[in-house]
């Protein structure tokens, strides 16, 4: 099964979450969109699919801010955001 990527994007002065060509939103801030993307990704990961949430910084570079491979319900495995190559 392919990795599920949840992308936070800005379009028409709003923030959106894009997942496999379907948009969720709009959201008033990048942070709100990122939180919703993480919620959606966490739900999807329950099916056993690897998921990641990617959010752009101020310069438009995307960072992985959440990954199902590093998620833990008790918070013992903190995730360190990393920039997407490219």
Image (spheres, rainbow, N blue to C red):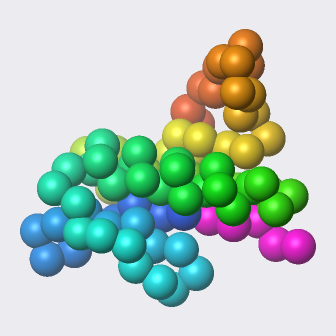
> How many numbered badges does the structure rendering display?
0
Q: Is residue 85 above or below residue 66?
A: below
Q: Position of residue 83 (x, y in %)?
A: 55, 42
The image quarter containing residue 67 is: top right
Q: Position of residue 6 (x, y in %)?
A: 54, 63
Q: Is residue 5 left or right of residue 31?
A: right
Q: Is residue 72 above or below residue 22?
A: above
Say which residue appears at 70% left-offset and 27% top-offset: 73
Q: Is residue 60 left or right of residue 84?
A: left
Does the rendering let one see residue 44?
Answer: yes
Residue placed furthest toward the bottom: 21
Residue placed furthest toward the top: 76
Say which residue appears at 64% left-offset and 27% top-offset: 79
- The rendered magenta stretch, by its main secondary structure, is classed as loop
Does the rendering let one see residue 59?
Answer: no
Q: Position of residue 32 (x, y in %)?
A: 29, 48
In terms of depth relative to the viewer, which is nearer, 10 or 19?
A: 19
Residue span colored magenta: 1-5
Q: Is residue 37 above or below residue 65?
A: below
Quadrant location of the N terminus in the rendered image: bottom right
**In magenta segment, residue 66:** no
Quadrant location of the C terminus in the rendered image: bottom right
In terms of depth relative to the viewer, which is nearer, 79 or 41?
A: 41
In terms of depth relative to the viewer, which is nearer, 55 or 28?
A: 28
Q: Position of residue 9 (x, y in %)?
A: 34, 65
Say which residue appears at 53% left-offset and 40% top-offset: 65
Say which residue appears at 22% left-offset and 74% top-offset: 11
């Amino acid at each position: 099964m392919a990795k599920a990527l949840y992308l936070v994007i800005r379009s028409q002065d709003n923030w959106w979450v894009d997942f496999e060509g379907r948009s969720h939103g709009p959201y008033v801030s990048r942070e709100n969109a990122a939180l919703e993307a993480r919620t959606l990704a966490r739900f999807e990961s329950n099916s056993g699919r690897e998921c990641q949430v990617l959010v752009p910084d101020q310069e438009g570079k995307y960072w992985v801010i959440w990954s199902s491979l590093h998620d833990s319900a008790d918070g013992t495995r903190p995730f360190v955001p990393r920039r997407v190559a490219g």
